[in-house]
Image (tube, helix red, strand yellow):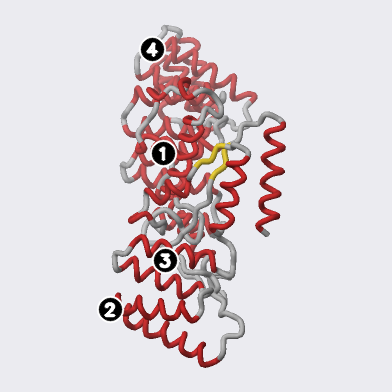
């Protein structure tokens, strides 16, 4: 298997190099501390007496570890390993006990060995990791040492659940660290452009990049639910376990509905945004909308909601700028209508008139059209703009059109009566 792995790597790298494709290879990372081996094998031809002695060592080690008699527990696990040097379970138990005893270097060695002896090879062994490094060294390919970055950012240098969800998939913090490590390698190695051409003055803090990512509690909750569903089945369980979950807050409620397939992803983000807005948490509301915008950057819809939340918060200048961003991203009648409303609020009827007329022009050809109520409201706003500009004839015309659409529109009828006097 290792030979096939090496040959595949060599072919991939040779093909890329032959075509002048810049290459960065990443090392592999997995959960050493907080994920036990999937399967442990007992050494073949072990006689029953030795097997019973091994089992007794493990049992005593477990009992001693449970009462925090750590040195004695370590001794029992080591005795078990002497009897069977290929059993992943024994190495894992030894590693965890060494960790609890504060003997972290020894713990890392034992936990790494437990991972490598796992009979279900879902995590790359050190042999394969070293093969990757050898091939890259021979071909002078840049390597991004994600494994070292994860270790450096884990307690006592041993990767666990602080960065990895289960056996090998990173959590949000882990993915952020992975991306940061890759980008720094790309910069420092001159693999794309000389490092001098990188504009480090534009660099942000980790918090700034995390905010830019729009990752939120929704993402981490969805991830936790999906992992919980995954880990109730093989290979995490020999028999599939039932799954029950009772949401304790609005984030969990919406995330669970999405995971169950009862709500589309964008609808879930929008529903959570509205829940945040109703609670007065407008920054969080806008963040959920921007998460959708990152996936569909060509769409006006999430950006319109961002602008609306600025308006609901009373941040009118930010709202106007956001409406402009919305219509510049994708022309739509809704953003134009709201820009017209904003300009009326600012006593700029000429600018308002321009935006409102444009809204109706766009609406004629738009896929998403103004509702009848929206059209009536737009005619009313046009009437106000015309009236402020002194064109009372056209103002009355627009009000009559508004009432033709919505006969019970009280504000339109009242203004029309005033203009007829």
Image depth: mark 1 or mark 4 in front? 1
Do the CB atoms of the residues marked 4 and 3 lie less than 8 Å apart? no
Looking at the image, can residue 413 be seen?
no
Identify the residue at horizontal 43%, vertical 39% (top origin): 214
Identify the residue at horizontal 59%, vertical 22% (top origin): 362
Left or right for 256, reference 154? right
* Marks 4 and 2, how far apart at CA: 79 Å
**Label 2 or label 3, whichever comes before in sequence order:** 2
Q: Which residue is mark 2?
A: 69
**Label 1 or label 4, whichever comes before in sequence order:** 1
* Marks 4 and 3, how far apart at CA: 52 Å
At mark 2, the secondary structure is: loop
Q: Which residue is mark 4?
A: 348
**Extreme residue in the left direction:** 68
Do the CB atoms of the residues marked 4 and 2 lie less than 8 Å apart? no
Do the CB atoms of the residues marked 1 and 3 lie less than 8 Å apart? no
Q: Which residue is mark 1?
A: 287
* Marks 1 and 3, how far apart at CA: 26 Å
Image depth: mark 2 or mark 1 in front? 2
Q: Which residue is mark 3?
A: 246
Quadrant for the C terminus, please. top left
Do the CB atoms of the residues marked 1 and 4 lie less than 8 Å apart? no
In the rendered view, would you say 33 is above or below 25? below
From the top left corner, tell me how far across and down residue 221 is, in percent: 43, 55
């Amino acid at each position: 298997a290792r030979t096939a792995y090496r040959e595949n790597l060599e072919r991939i790298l040779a093909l890329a190099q032959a075509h002048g494709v810049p290459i960065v290879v990443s090392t592999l990372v997995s959960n050493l501390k907080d994920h036990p081996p999937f399967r442990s094998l007992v050494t073949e031809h072990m006689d029953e007496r030795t097997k019973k002695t091994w089992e007794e060592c493990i049992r005593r080690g477990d009992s001693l570890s449970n009462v925090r008699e750590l040195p004695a527990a370590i001794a029992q696990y080591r005795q078990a390993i002497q009897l069977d040097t290929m059993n992943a379970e024994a190495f894992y138990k030894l590693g965890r006990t060494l960790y609890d005893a504060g003997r972290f270097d020894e713990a890392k060695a034992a936990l790494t060995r437990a991972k490598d002896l796992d009979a279900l090879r879902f995590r790359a062994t050190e042999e394969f990791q070293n093969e990757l490094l050898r091939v890259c060294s021979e071909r002078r390919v840049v390597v991004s040492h994600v494994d070292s970055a994860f270790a450096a950012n884990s307690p006592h240098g041993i990767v666990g659940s602080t960065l990895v969800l289960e056996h090998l998939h990173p959590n949000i913090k882990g993915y952020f660290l992975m991306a940061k490590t890759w980008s720094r390698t790309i910069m420092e190695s001159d693999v794309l452009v000389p490092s001098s051409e990188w504009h480090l003055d534009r660099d942000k803090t980790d918090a700034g990049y995390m905010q830019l990512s729009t990752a939120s509690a929704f993402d981490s909750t969805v991830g936790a639910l999906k992992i919980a569903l995954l880990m109730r089945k093989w290979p995490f369980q020999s028999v599939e376990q039932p799954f029950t979950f009772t949401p304790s807050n609005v984030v969990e409620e919406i995330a669970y509905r999405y995971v169950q397939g009862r709500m589309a992803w964008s609808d879930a983000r929008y529903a959570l945004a509205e829940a945040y807005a109703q609670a007065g948490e407008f920054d969080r509301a806008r963040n959920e909308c921007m998460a959708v915008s990152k996936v569909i950057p060509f769409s006006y819809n999430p950006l319109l909601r961002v602008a609306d939340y600025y308006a609901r918060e009373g941040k009118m200048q930010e709202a106007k700028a956001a409406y402009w961003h919305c219509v510049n991203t994708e022309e739509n009648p809704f953003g134009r209508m709201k820009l017209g409303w904003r300009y009326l609020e600012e006593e700029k009827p000429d600018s308002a008139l321009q935006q409102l007329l444009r809204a109706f022009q766009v609406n004629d050809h738009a896929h998403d059209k103004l509702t009848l109520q929206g059209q009536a409201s737009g005619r009313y706003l046009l009437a106000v703009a015309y009236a402020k500009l002194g064109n009372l004839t056209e103002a009355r015309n627009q009000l009559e059109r508004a009432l033709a659409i919505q006969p019970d529109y009280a504000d339109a009828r009242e203004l029309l009566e005033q203009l007829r006097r």
